[in-house]
Image (tube, rainbow, N blue to C red):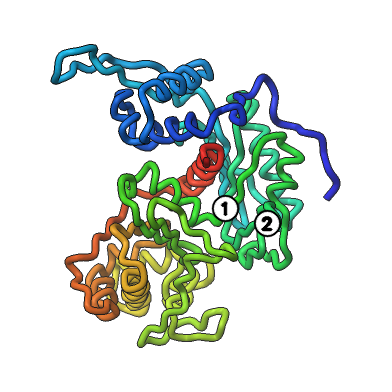
Amino acid sequence: MTSHPAEIASGPPLRWSALSATGRRVLLDLLVHGPRSRIRIAERLGLSRASLTRVARELVDAGLILPGDMLASASRGRPAEELHLRPQAAHFVGVKVTAERVYAVVTDLAATVVDELEIALVSPAEGEVVDAIVDATRALGARHGTMSALGVGLAADVLRREGEPLVASSPLLGWSAPVPLARLLAERVGMPVTIANDVHALTAAHHWFGSGVDHRSVVVYGVGAGIGCGVVIDDELVQGSHGRSGRVGHTRIARTGRPCTNGHPDCVHSFVSMPAIEANAGVAPGDYAVALERARAADGRERAAFASAAYALGAAVAETVNLLDPELISLMGEGLDMLDLDPAAFDDGLSAHLEQVPRTSVRIDRPPFAFGLYARGAAATAIRELLSV
């Protein structure tokens, strides 16, 4: 693809590169944990009061935080002053790419979505995807002004080669050769670009802003057109040396379903995805809603497809618990109707595959989900990249 001049960024951008490493740490603490007194922040981050005073001034001058309320102290002396994040100080674009569409959102610094749009793809070819992301970013930038960064999430292996992020492959998009997507986009949009696996991006946002906050180990399952998971260990997102962490689909199940791409008729991929449910329910590709309606109405082949999916998902979650023993597992995605139709099958699969672990000790939640959370997660990865120290 030929290079283009920067098309998006305009106006004086916030100078993220000028922020000190300590300033980023303080900003991150306020972002994740909310307003805090100077004393609490200094204690949490191991800073002297003098250091925190200098950093607070730096962040106030940059327009990123505001001094807040004066908190009464239990002991005599000067009341403690809270510091507050200014979410409106910066905006970010987050994009989720599918084979048919680009979903884009604008978030503020606290990853709250303030705008969104969708652009249909003529095809998932590399050039079409790049153009659609640029168009979406341009449209949102026209509405909200200068953006600090762009984050893109897609179903793909994402790795770094000599410091450059590359989309190594994406079967969903039909990409088999490495694509320097971040560089191609940065040349067009004139701002920092972060690329991430879509479930990893969803996990990063959930760890900071969802029920995963304050947990040092979290596993997030994303179930929809496929199945994958994101892993946080010791507060760090695990991406793997080849960008492939979270592959959970080939655990074998004592049932027979749709053959997966590796030819297995009895693995998690054979059951747990919307296309697998369609095939096992005997409906046409893309008729997931038809399968769901029939499963709700009668106890036939369609209901059995959802029950098998629930059992297989339980088995996959169990293997994750056996391997990682996380504090929390969150189930997310647009393809989790099997949990409503047959929650007992999920528990059966979980219990059957757990190794010397009581079911009651496994904490699992199912947070509210909307498809736009993938795009929000991509924006959160861009925020995370800017604040990494």
> Could you tell me residue 44's position as x and y percent?
32, 35
Can residue 323 be seen here? The reply is yes
Q: Quadrant of residue 73?
A: top left
Residue depicted at 59% across the width and 65% down the height: 242
Amino acid carrying label 1: it is Ala
> Could you tell me residue 123's position as x and y percent?
70, 57
Residue depicted at 82% across the width and 39% down the height: 4
Judging depth in this view, the residue of 383 and 124 nearest the camera is 383
- Residue 196 image label: 1
Q: Pick out the residue farthest to the right.
A: 2
Residue depicted at 46% across the width and 62% down the height: 224
Judging depth in this view, the residue of 148 and 277 nearest the camera is 148
Can residue 287 be seen here? The reply is no
* CA separation in Å, label 1 and label 2: 9 Å
Q: Quadrant of residue 313?
A: bottom left
Judging depth in this view, the residue of 132 and 122 nearest the camera is 132
> Can you say whether 327 is above or below 148 in the image?
below
Give the residue number, with chain letter if any, for mark 2.
Answer: 166
Q: Residues within 10 Å of mark 2 (few under 14, many from 20)?
A: many
Left or right position of 156 against 44? right
1 or 2: tag closer to the N-terminus? 2
> Can you say whether 188 is above or below 57 in the image?
below
Amino acid carrying label 2: it is Leu
Left or right position of 95 against 322? right
Left or right position of 151 against 228? right
